[in-house]
Amino acid sequence: MASNRVTSHDVARLAGVSRATVSLVLNRSESVTLSKETRERVMQAAAELGYKPNSAGRMLVSGLTETIGLIVSDPSILLVDQYIPQVLYGIEKANRQMGFHVLVEGLEAGGRTRAYDNLVESRRIDGLIVVNPRAGDRALISLIEKDFPVVLVGSVRHPAEVSVTFTTRNVIGQAVDHVVGLGHHRIGAITFSPRDFVSTNARLTALSSGLARHGLALDEDAVGDGNFSPESGYRAAKALLTRRPDLTAIFAGNDTIAIGVLNAAHELGRSVPADLSIVGFDDLPFARWLTPPLTTIRTDGVSQGKLAAEMLFARLHRRPLENKRVRMEPELVVRDSTQTAPTG
């Protein structure tokens, strides 16, 4: 009960500042320039005393609901993939630091535009983060064109979008150089999702370009379609290796799909890496503990989510963005799932 009796006067006294300064800091006002040290001293004093500023008062001052919307393009991903939860952790961590709340909605496979209506038109949120957006999502593109505060984790390749994603061409090119350098010339791929996701097509395009530099092609019959889960990777890889038993290397759309590829290879009697080399994408925590440890491309989902949230906060406070389309650089991690191509 003691914390309910704490007032802004108490916080001001402990921090050694005026009550007006406490109000400016706790309401996150930027109308007056305050030093970082002053802001931190006030926040520390409020935390020590257990002071909770009145949310209605903050809304009157800032004009914000202090709530952002979070849309996951396909909520079923959360059941099977470990990368998206890392992104969500980064978003939640940034929101916690800013004192914001998060409302989560999911889109069905066909793109349920009602999710946007529920969050945006009802004025329940100040801004929106969309994770893994689909190409051609008209409701999302409409929000972008209306300049609603929305940040994409991924891309729909709209010129006005604000987004955080990863560059793929260079690092996938390095992975191709690595695999071809081991003597592999018959190379296939399994996507991590249906091909209406921009990132899926970008990875296939980068793979094709990397192979073309070596005078090789990614044949359409050497590509299988996954659907987020290890099981889908297993089914796609089993069909692919049955159709194209000559393949000696497979690029999996992500590490989750790579688990299925490993199991399909084992079931078909293909030793990894002696008979078949496998490359993943994401370097999820389990990748180094697979048998064999997975060669993959390392990304940082937590940082990607945190940065997306920080960019949204900047938009909400009308701060200019130095870069509206941030491209983070992944890196190739070579482990034991790739080795010299088999002869014969």
Image (cartoon, rainbow, N blue to C red):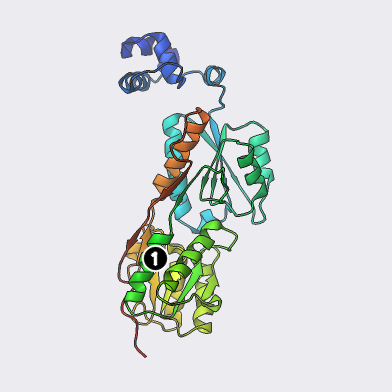
Residue 344 rendering spot, x and y as whole percentages:
37, 91
Q: Where, by quadrant of the figure, is residue 21 drawn?
A: top left
Q: Residue at x 37, y 13 (%)?
A: 11
Q: Where, by quadrant of the figure, is residue 331 drawn?
A: bottom left
- 71 displayed left or right of 52: right
In the image, farthest residue toward the bottom = 344
Residue 198 rendering spot, x and y as whole percentages:
55, 57
Q: Residue at x 48, y 72 (%)?
A: 189
Residue 110 rendering spot, x and y as whole percentages:
67, 55
Q: Residue at x 57, y 31 (%)?
A: 126
Mark 1 highlights which residue?
173
Question: 130 above or below 315?
Answer: below
Q: Secondary structure at mark 1?
A: helix
Q: Identify which residue, 32 or 60, lies in the foreground.
A: 32
The type of residue carrying mark 1 is: Gly
- 298 displayed left or right of 246: left
Question: 18 above or below 214?
Answer: above
Question: 96 above or below 277?
Answer: above
